[in-house]
Amino acid sequence: MKKFLALFLAAAMLVSTMTACSSAPATEGEGTETEKVLLIGGTGPLTGDYATYGTSVKQGAELAAKEINAAGGVNGWTVVARVEDDQADGAQAVQAYATLYDDGMDVTLGGTTSGACIAMTEEAVKDGMLLLTPSGSQLECTQYDNCFRVCFEDSAQGLYAANFIKDNAVGEKVAIIYDKSNDYSNGLRNSFVATAAENGLNVVTEQAFTDQSNTDFSVQLQAVKDSGADLLFLPIYAQEAAYIITQADKVGLDVTFFGCDGLDGILEKIGADNLPLTEGVMLLTPFAADSETEPTKSFTAAFKADYGYTPDQFAADAYDAVYAIVEAMKHADTNPDDPEFNEKMIKAMTEITVVGTTGTMQWTPEGEPDKNATAVVIVDGVYVSYDNVK
């Protein structure tokens, strides 16, 4: 009996030792030392109608983490970028945030869509965590001092779009179709209309729809046609824009289609059979994949090599967001073991300059990026910088 007990205890100690060792992965080349991981977590729609946005954010963030780790990580830490599916729903985003937080999330990318991101700001501010959303464009996405964004805020997009159309004489008579049930669409529409009035841009008709009537646009398109508009401003998402563009062809509407970041993804949504209808479609963006700037060239090449297609601005925003987080960590000379990590990271965001794929960025204390906007035009099924086609 004593011999049996001795063998039993020895076996139990061995199992305990093996279990303890397996729970802490070793850093490569450092034997049993626990790997130090900076977990950057975010959410986005990876399924459903708006999955193209979340998928792009996920891929852009993961590519940045891969490159950073290949270059040695940051301050001795390995970067892990993880994006969970929230189906563009605020409640699901909050649940995903809780899961990521329990798993040791150090910095959050917030949500991909504005509604999900706003819900997550409430959690991030309670935790004192830095939130840097790639694409949450509604004003409230940066409502707290710990919240920043890479993309333009809605009202800024509407302002830039109206000015761009006027300054480049893209259209003389402008029609608008917008989703009055959507905060993103309303924000863009309101800013665009106000700026258009200030600079003399002629808005000839405005047509609205809701999330209960977002597949049949025959009435709105007929009104646009009757107005004599030569440009149709679409401050909406790609899903609805795909319906509008295909139905516009059927009623013989000949206009230039112009949108903002929500229109990105139109190539995927409209389908291969209708791809010719996107020829000449324009959208405001800080990112053009054919740009000759070095950050954009290297990013686009690496993205194509990994995923097999050209990145959109959502992927570029997420890629820049991860690099900005790493730059803030370097600037603050901190890491997640630092008791003041959160405070130092938030402060560093207003002190760094990041030369990214979406421009050279600095951030205001309000969380807004200071960078330039441009536009791309769809030519032969790809986005081309407006400067290269005008």
Image: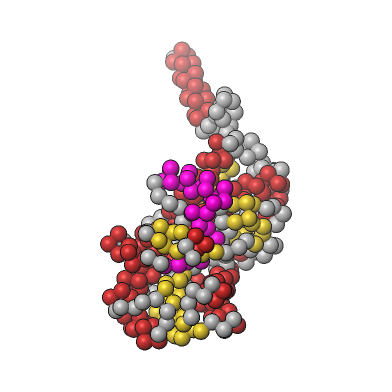
Residue 181: within the magenta?
no
**At x 37% / y 59%, what residue is drawn?**
380
Q: Judge whether 163 appears above or below 52 on screen.
A: below
> x%, y% of residue 27?
56, 30
- Stretch in magenta: 281-307
Q: From where the camera sits, is residue 259 visible?
A: yes
Say if 259 sits above or below 58 in the image: below
Where is residue 109 shown, x and y percent of the image? 55, 54
In the image, residue 46 above or below residue 15: below
Q: In which image quadrant can residue 162 be found?
A: bottom right
Which residue is at a point 67% across and 59% down the rendered structure image?
A: 363
Quadrant containing the N terminus is top left
User: Left or right of 107: which side holds 50?
Assistant: left
Q: Is residue 16 left or right of residue 212?
A: right
Tell me where residue 74 appears, x and y as whole percent: 63, 40
Tally the numbered discs.
0
**Which one is nearer the viewer's eye here, 374 or 241?**
374
- In the current view of this chain or complex, which residue is farthest to the top? 3
5 lies left or right of 28: left
Q: Where residue 138 appears, x then y in whole percent?
A: 55, 68
Is residue 125 something one can see in this rendering?
Answer: no
Residue at point 46% right, 16% down? 7
* Residue 292 magenta: yes
